[in-house]
Image (cartoon, grey):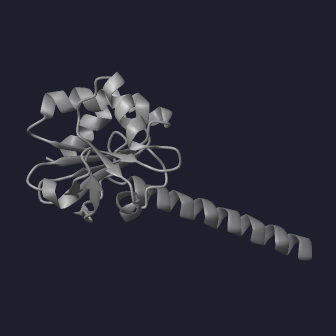
Amino acid sequence: MKKKFVLAAAVLAFVLFIGASYFSYGLLSEGASAGVSTAKKPAADFTVRDSGGNSVRLSDLRGKPTVVNFWATWCPPCRSEMPHFQAVYEEMKGEVNFMMIDLVGGGETQDKAEDYLRQRNFSFPVYYDTTGEASGTYGVNAIPTSLFIDASGNITGQTVGAMDLATLKSGINSAR
């Protein structure tokens, strides 16, 4: 009798787990398109540094859609998506802000990032999160992570992981 009860409880727990997982997956993926999560909420502000050491705030870029990308040179998925960012930057500069944020620390330095960018002729704007403020503001614990922000300062989409060109453009379109 006790074995039947334990078995029944285990089966019930498993069924509840599967049901909760299915329900949670449905909520998390609702509205997602081409790998871009589409929850619209105000973007929290942060400050990073440009290559000259000047402070730049996310809120300074309001007025145009903005792509924020957290990356590092040691990250293969980050490196794989950089050519897509360069192509879209060349196509849309003036219409869309790009805030490519290198996560400085743990062996990553601004000099390493600048050498990497120079060797590959990347010309999109790069900023440096030297204090962890930007990545901490958004709880970035995996890179690459990208945010898509509309001209009013609302997050319209987010991706974690490397994007292909179509996904990048889809995220930008969500911010227009």
Where is 121 relative to 75, above or below? above
Residue 172 occupies quadrant:
top left
Towards the viewer: 113 or 143:
113
Q: Position of residue 150 (x, y in %)?
A: 16, 53
Query: Total marks drawn?
Result: 0
Residue depicted at x 45% and y 45%: 143
Where is 108 relative to 79, above or below? below
Residue depicted at x 69% and y 68%: 13
Q: Where is residue 78 in the image (x, y as percent from the top left)?
A: 42, 36
Q: Can residue 1 be seen in this view?
A: no
Q: Report the side of 10 relative to 161 (left or right).
A: right
Q: Report the side of 3 relative to 51 (left or right).
A: right
Which quarter of the figure is the N terminus placed in?
bottom right
Towards the viewer: 129 or 92:
129
Residue depicted at x 25% and y 39%: 170
Q: Can residue 74 be seen in this view?
A: yes
Residue 116 occupies quadrant:
top left
Q: Position of residue 94 (x, y in %)?
A: 8, 38
Residue 119 occupies quadrant:
top left
Residue depicted at x 42% and y 29%: 80
Where is 137 relative to 110, above or below? below
Q: Position of residue 31 (x, y in %)?
A: 31, 52
